[in-house]
Amino acid sequence: MKIISDNGKAVELKSIITCPHCGFKKEETMPTDACRFFYECENCKTVLRPKQGDCCVYCSYGTIKCPPMETDKKCC
């Protein structure tokens, strides 16, 4: 699923998060108006937090970076 941002760039809203603890993968729809700082793995129940230097769990563990990063804007 893609949308066009206010600066005309295409933004992908689907990202596959991979748990670094158990390797479980799940496709999630990213919010366009907020970053996600916590994410609980559906399989092992580990709560993921962004790696140092990343703004959200999608930037750290997803296949696609969060929408603000995709459009070259400051993240949340």
Image: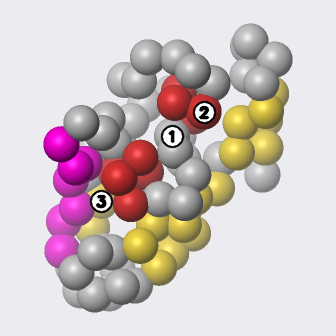
The nearer-to-camera label among 3 and 2 is 2
Q: x, y (%) of residue 53? A: 24, 36
10 or 53: nearer the viewer: 53
Q: x, y (%) of residue 35? A: 39, 36
The quarter of the rendered structure image containing the C terminus is top left
Residue at the image point whose x is 22% and y is 81% from the top:
21
Residue at the image point whose x is 30% and y is 39% from the top:
54
The nearer-to-camera label among 3 and 1 is 1
Viewed as shown, does residue 3 lie left or right of 45? Answer: right
Residue at the image point whose x is 43% and y is 31% from the top:
34
Please identify the quarter of the rendering in which residue 48 is found: bottom left
Whether residue 24 is visible here, answered yes or no, is yes
Classified by dominant secondary structure, the portion drawn in magenta counts as loop
Whether residue 29 is visible here, answered yes or no, is no
- The answer to whether marks 1 and 2 mark residues whose Cβ atoms lie closer than 8 Å is yes
Specify whether residue 76 is painted magenta: no
Q: Name the residue under label 3.
A: 39
Mark 1 → mark 2, Cα distance in angstroms? 6 Å
Q: Where are the magenta residues, as a range?
A: 46-52
